Structure formats: C-alpha cells, structure tokens
Amino acid sequence: MGERTGSFAVAMAAIAFAALAFAGGSAGPLGAETAAKSRPVAPESSTAGEILPAPPEHPDPTKRYLFYLHGRIVEDAGPRPSNELFGTYEYPEILDRMAAAGFVVISEQRAPATDPATYSERVAEQVKTLLAAGVPAERITVSGFSKGGGIAVLTSARLAEPRVNFVFMGACAGGPPDPKIHVSGYVLTIHEDSDRIASPCGPLLEQAGEVPAKRAITIHTGRGHGAFWQPRDEWLGPLLEWARTAGGRDPE
C-alpha cells in the first residue's frame, strides 16, 4: 500500500497530539500481559552491533536493524536530560545496550519541535531503503517511547508493511484512537502500570484488526512514564526479544 495523503495526513497529526505533550510466531490473543518480575536483558552478543543516525549505505541483509525513537525531552534538552521526577534520560546508554545485544541500532537526536507526521515519513522511507537493499522485513524493528512511540505508531500506519516489527512504549493517549489510524506489522506495546502520562494501547490494537501479531504487556516498576528513561530490564528485555525473534516468528 502506498502512502496516503490529505485526510490521512490530518488524522496522523491528530493521533500525534498526545505525543507532542508527553514529557519526556503468533504472539497469542490480544490482551494485556503483566510482566510480574524483571525479565533479563539479552546477553551481549558475540558480534556487537553498531549505532548509526541513519541506515548504512550498503546494509548487510544478515543483520538485524533496530530503530529507536526517543522521547520529546531529548529534542528539547539534549541526550541526557534530567528532572526531579524521573531522573536522567539515559539515551546514549539505551542505544549502547541495544547495540551490545547485536543489533544495528538506528537512532538520531531529533531537532526541537519535530513534527511527528513528517518525521514518520522519514522513518518509513528509511525502512523502505532497507527493504529495497534486500534486508528481510522480519529483521527490521521500529521502536519508540513517548513522542517517539507516537512517531512509531504513525510509521506503522504509513508504511502498511505487515512483516515489519514494531514496539510502542508509553505511546498512547487516553480515549479512542483516531479511526483513520490502522497500525500494521508485528506489534508489541509496553505500558507502565503507574504511568499517568500515557495510557495502554489496547484500543489502538483492537482497531488494527487482523495484523499478523499483536501483544500488549504491562510492567510494574513504580517509575511511571520515567521507567523508560533508563535501560531497565522490564521493558528492554521484551523489546529485544520481540526484535530478535521477529515477533515470535524466528525463535532462537
């Protein structure tokens, strides 16, 4: 499916409004799972990955590519912003942990006031570049947190590629999603139980209909939205597992 314009672009901007406000195999039937205890993060790979701001010019189709879209506060206050409520957003450390697990990590610090809909076009085109270069779709994962999670949602809807993996963290606002937004792909959502900024993405997944796989989990750290500011096992473990196993299609 090609990119849609006009009213679809308006709808994409509408679903992203909450992201702008944020501070900062079959996966089974839909339904929130509870991550009752910390899940160990994958051990460092014998072949460590790398961190790039954009896809490489000549991508290796045997590698796994992981996009990470950070929260809004990194746009506004740099790569390691802090506040009294959540502590320090360890953006560089998050990327390091992802690369240590063997992924080619694609992430850049966005400019302040980046438009989510416009940036989702950029990410969708980068994914298409990897696909055109022969990288299998199941080896590509787009993940995002808060505003970055909203951008990942928009990328999924815009790309409409059912084989790509997506992970949305702290990405959904309360209330029903825009009816024009239909995410695609192998979708994992992660919600922190004490988060008072973002809401569970259940309605978004229900609206998605017959996507290949959709799974929602809830973590319990007591850190609210700030749980995703540091590379905690509770969320990073499920994310890396989803990316490594292609949403359950390719267990290792």
Image (cartoon, rainbow, N blue to C red):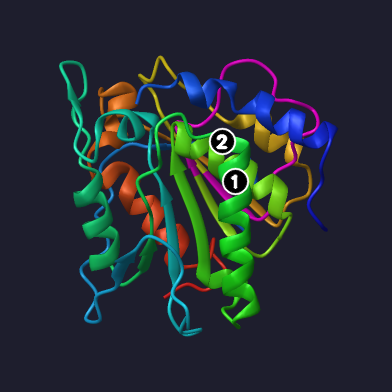
Q: CA distance from mark 2 to mark 1?
A: 6 Å
Quadrant (top left, top right, bottom left, bottom right) of the C terminus = bottom left
Measuring from the top left, give residue 167's x and y in whole percent: 50, 48
Magenta span includes 185: yes
Q: Which residues are magenta?
A: 168-188
Give residue 154's quadrant in the image. Answer: top right
Kind of residue sitting beneath label 1: Ser
What's the residue at 36%, 22% (across, down)? 23
Q: Main secondary structure of the magenta part?
A: loop
Q: Is residue 67 left or right of residue 208?
A: left
What's the residue at 57%, 73% (across, down)? 130
Q: Which residue is mark 1?
A: 120
Q: Are marks 2 and 1 in contact (CB under 8 Å)?
A: yes
Determine whether 109 is above or below 19 in the image.
Answer: below
What's the residue at 59%, 81% (across, down)? 133
Give residue 25's quadrant in the image. Answer: bottom right
Given residues 173 and 134, the one toward you in this image is: 134
Q: Which residue is mark 2?
A: 116
